[in-house]
Amino acid sequence: MKNYLVYQAYGSIDILHECIYSVLSFYKYNSDSDTHIIIYTDSRPYLQSYLGQAISYQDIEQSQIDFWKGEIDFIHRVKIKILQDFISRYEGNLLYTDTDTIFRSDISNIYKNIADDKLYMHQNEGRIGHEDNTMMRKVNRFFKSNVITERIDISPAAITNLSMYNAGVLGFHTDQKHILSKSLIFTDEIYPMFPRHIVEQLAFSLYMQTSGPLHEAREQIFHYWNFKEFRIILKDFFEKYNNMPIESLIERIENINPQRLIKPKLAYEQTRGMQRIYQKIIKGKWQMPAYEL
């Protein structure tokens, strides 16, 4: 049974750099893997200049991206449509990751579990009904106070008792394509009523949990969705090492590992009240750690 790793990388050069770095991190820990990597992109030549020909590139144009946004014009709907397109072409164990991810270890066990009908998302962010943050509270109260169309086969009461997962990683066998069709219906129905960026994430969270054993991938994959400051470092890195063989690039990626560089930012964001005010005045918000390209 074949293993696949899928990305969507189009538009901004920052997204392309994230994708390249993520693939390099995959190779670092999975050098003996027979995983087939597929990137949906509008920038094949640029990606190939760093990653070479071993990867499959599925060319997409802006017109296709706009079509996949649908009538609701929702950018995160594109992820669902890309995965539906993938399943129409391939069969096997599918692992999708956002570009702003890095691999921390070998993931062969993830693929073995997917072959056994286990499911993966990146991280459990808490039960919706617990309203642990502002967005979770808005989601919970929306479903408590609105009548949901019959096309959505999960009740508001059930949604309250389920958890929100980070959708930066999605893992499932292509036989479970119903996850995508149900997530698409949910997104198309809910987004016009509740136009928030997390609707696609919520859809995957709900239908993955109700489709089989759902596991976290955070031990094997780090998702730095809250570290846009890393993009300038990636830009400098790839400008410096343009035309360098991929083996040499892999040797250097640890120098700028975002899991290390993000620590001061996370520490600052965990401070509260007067402690944060003091740090902001005396030291500034936070400082990027020293690194060498």
Image (spheres, rainbow, N blue to C red):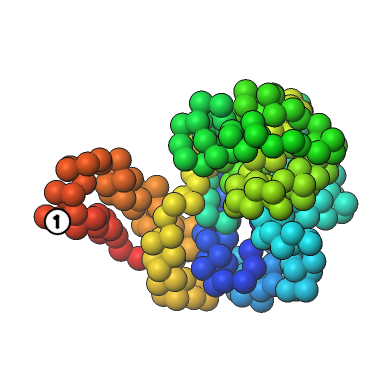
Residue 247, x across and y down, in percent: 52, 61
219 in relation to 80, above or below = above
Q: Which quadrant would the C terminus be assigned to in this image?
A: bottom left
Disc 1 residue type (three-letter):
Ile
135 sits to left or right of 82: left
200 sits to left or right of 105: right
- Evaluate whether residue 15 shows in this view: yes
Tell me the quarter of the picture where residue 139 sits: top right
256 sits to left or right of 110: left
Residue 226, x across and y down, in percent: 44, 52
The residue at the point 36 percent across, 57 percent down is 255
Farthest residue to the left: give it: 282
244 in relation to 89, above or below = below
Return the residue at label 1.
281
The residue at the point 50 percent across, 31 percent down is 131
Q: Which quadrant would the N terminus be assigned to in this image?
A: top right
The residue at the point 56 percent across, 26 percent down is 129
| SS at circle 1 | helix
Farthest residue to the right: give it: 88
In terms of depth relative to the viewer, which is nearer, 54 or 87?
87
